[in-house]
Amino acid sequence: MLLRHTPKEIIKRSALTISPAKTCQPIGAMYAALGVHSCLPHSHGSQGCCSYHRSALTRHYKDPIMAGTSSFTEGSCVFGGQANLLQGISNIFTIYEPDIIAVHTTCLSETIGDDVNQIVQKAKDDGKVPEGKKIIHCNTPSYVGSHVTGFSNMVAGIVKGLAASTGIKTNTINIIPGWVEPSDMREIKRIAKDMGISIVLFPDTSDVVDTPQTGKFKMYPDGGVTQKEMAITGDSKATLALGSFASEAGAKQLDISFKVPFKVLDIPIGLSATDRFIESLSSVAGVKVPDSFVAERGRLVDVITDMSQYFYGKKVALFGDPDQLIPLTEFLIDLNMKPVHMVSGTPGKKFMERIEEVSGDLFKTMNVQNGAQADMFLLHQWIKNEKPDLLIGNTYGKYIARDEGIPFVRMGFPILDRIGHSYFPTVGYSGGIRILEKMLDAILDHKDATCSEIEMELVL
Amino acid sequence: MDILQSRKKQVVRSNGQGMSIVCEKRSASGSVSQRACVFCGSRVVLYPIADALHIVHGPIGCAAYTWDIRGSVSSGPELHRLSFSTDLRETDIIFGGEKKLEAMLDELIDQYSPKAAFVYATCVVGVIGDDVAAICKKMTNKKKIPVIPVHSEGFKGTKKDGYQAACDAIACLVGTGSISGISPVSINIMGEFNLAGETWIIKEYFKKMGIEVITTMTGDGRVEELKRAHGAKLNVVQCSGSMMAIAKTMKEKYGIPFIRVSYFGIEDMADALYQIADYFKEQDRGIIERTEKLVRKEILDLNDQLEGYRQDLAGKKAAIYVGGAFKALSLIKALRHLGMKTVVVGSQTGNADDYKRLQALAEPGTIIVDDSNPVELASFVLEKDVDLFIGGVKERPIAYKLGIGFCDHNHERKIPLAGFAGMINFAKEVHKSVISPVWNLVPRRYHRAD
Ligand code: SF4
Ligand code: SF4
């Protein structure tokens, strides 16, 4: 038992976090910045943070992840990091030649009080930013929020730095997909295309962190939203922000700067959330939902009906990020499953409110916590007290799953030990089928491996 | 490709004579360096001590990224599998995190009764000025176990400085236990972290030689053993950076000499055992014979097994980019054993001495580089048209994108590469990647064929 040091009795903890269900802001900012074409994320702080963030993203995507660092020294901590950042900016533009540098801060540069806005301004004034090149930036102190907050902050930074308007309104819709996989972003673009709607999706990490093997190393892969696309987002008819935690800030910023109205939706995970997404998209764009979507939806419903007996009443423990957990919980309840335990390290009242909304009467029976001390340790303790039939979350759940003998489905960030997330979406109707497939595989494989010989069945 | 002007002296092309490389430099700001921080160094060194509590004092990220990423295995307690963090929030940054840390230590030590606790100070803690040492002292007195501060603020340097901080922390334990009953033929194993059970392989050799191992720093480490480390007669240090500091301290303080060894590859492994046997030949007259017998048997077993791999690998070219340069030396030799040639070699943290030895060992024309970045590395391996890249997590996908085989020789490896048995595993790893049929399907290689 690898986690034998986790006791069943739930002890009150005043201070500590044990085995977190979150990580820090800059990694989110880095991921968001990778969704901009020819953009090099830059971590303003010590070398270690940047190295960790790159490694973590590399382990999840199995693709090279590039980012620069200001390489703070003790001197930078005393005198501030301005000199480092200025030097860094000119080095990056001469050596690595990105079109855009996306600077985010770290705990360290935040604590010593560096003013990135002012430093970037100085870089421009000093002529360190070549013609046509841009620097965008955001603040990402990790002692506030979580990795999701960092993503959200950089999305707002992208809008501030790159969005523009010509003053002539278009029929284009902006979509902010939230912190989802490149496969999901691809799927959202496919859906819009099949509906005949012109969109700008940002950030867009498809073809950036899921690149093909070509025999070449490309520092800036083909994907990512382009400067040109960003420059027309101010003219768009509306913005759809998927997930309030990761996407609302960016949408709001577009509204403030260019009066682009926005609507916040859940990430289209599962049947109901996808219904809402498709309906909203069709109504803001003023197009009819094509028949092919009725069929797509029908296929998902068909799988649910075929397999409903295996979902019925199954207890589920889940952990991850709020924007994912909310529609996922709703989906589980649509399937007649029972979410019993849920943690998210990301703080924010909205999470509880929404979970209560989508869970209805079930909410009273559930263990739900987010923010401080909502960690894997607590989740494990709950599980020891009431064992679920299924666990859903990132790779760190594997120890619990093994120790307690619970079927486990990997969803979320990071997934360090399996592939698939980059290639097969979990959003939309077909994404819903993939979630069903994964859950059934886990539950039924477990049953086949552990049931008595009498209960073993060929046909299910 | 352009190399940053300020980095030019960190790359040399070996011409057989001693050209000097500039190293042990801070990375240039703005570089996409593959290096990590002081905390990272301390954490990887101390983390395998499995019956101690490891608390990361700082914001959540520093702890989250180091949570269980190393394959150091334990034969007993698994306390190190949990990730403990003070998870500092905004108010802590303003008012200080001392109270939080103290409360946390209080709770955790009561709950887990660890043998010791290590408290890692991260960058932010260094800046907000928490007096970590004072809290540790207070807790040591209150809880009657060593509570040791690790001064690992990331900005204080590179991973290497983190090794130093870790050594300082271990030094607090050494010398506090009883050394009665220790054999005159006894050693400490240093700089061996039991990745994939490597320590156990090495220990088995020493057992067969009749040597008592007092403690391993720090693979499958235990606090009580570390406390007795000063009773050993010889310190056997592996790897360039990580444990030299403590070996030196112990030499000064307790008069225990040390030797540097490597357990990678047949030559270096055998050499290590012989050196140690030689050291103890006065105390134990049979040790040389036993060692010879052991080495002979192991090598005999090996040679047949290696032959098949050699045939496939002969003449293939390799690039090496690893943490410490000392390891690179062993790797060059081990690759030679497989008939392979090293044409690019570099490290994140080598020192001048290491690089001198690398140059002496490397073939003319080999590119030698300190603190490189992905763009440089990619251009070097393409220029030299290598078949294999040996590196760590950040290099792996780059190698694969270029259509080059890869072997992980850093802390994420899953199979033991140390010892004689490790040589077979190493050959297998290299073989499986280098001769994979997938390379015939990728564009670059495909074109090379015609
Ligand atoms: S210092 Fe802050 S930004 Fe850096 S790794 Fe730690 S939590 Fe993340
Ligand atoms: S904050 Fe400092 S200690 Fe933490 S990861 Fe970053 S560089 Fe390392």
Image: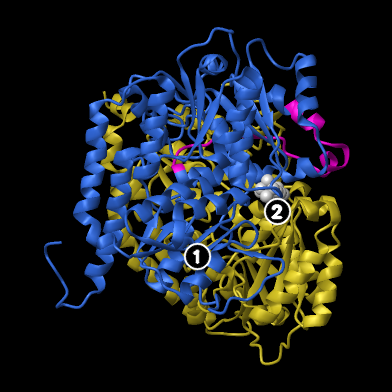
| SS label for mark 2 | loop
| Residue B59 spot, x, y in % from top left | 70, 53
Three-letter code for the amino acid on which mark 2 is drawn: Pro
Regarding residue B266, the answer to whether it shows in the image is no
Amino acid type, callout 1 = Lys
Name the residue beneath numbered marker 1. A364
Mark 2: C-beta under 8 Å from nearest atom of ligand 1: yes
Checking the image for residue A240, the label placed there is: none
Tag 1 secondary structure? helix
Q: Residue at x 53, y 14 (%)?
A: A228
Is A4 contained in the magenta span? no
Disc 1 packing (10 Å; few <14; some 14–19; many ≥20): few
Rendering colour (chain A): blue
Mark 2 vs mark 1, foreground winner is 1
Residue A195 visible in this rendered orientation of the protein: yes
Front in this rendered view, residue B257 or A35: A35
User: Residue at position x 68%, y 65% from top?
Assistant: A16
Task: Tell me, by letter, which chain the rendering colours yellow.
Answer: B
- In the image, residue A195 sits, relative to residue B426, either above or below, namely above
In the rendered image, which residue does mark 2 sit on? Answer: B59
The magenta span reads A61-87
Q: Magenta stretch: residue A71 in it?
A: yes
Same chain assignment for discs 2 and 1: no
**Of residues A16 and A69, the one drawn nearer to the viewer in this rendering:** A16
Residue B253 locus on image (x, y percent): 81, 73
Please report, as a chain letter, where disc 1 is located: A
Hey, which quadrant is residue B56 in on the image?
bottom right
Q: Quadrant of residue A134?
A: top right
Q: In which quarter of the image is residue B211?
A: bottom right
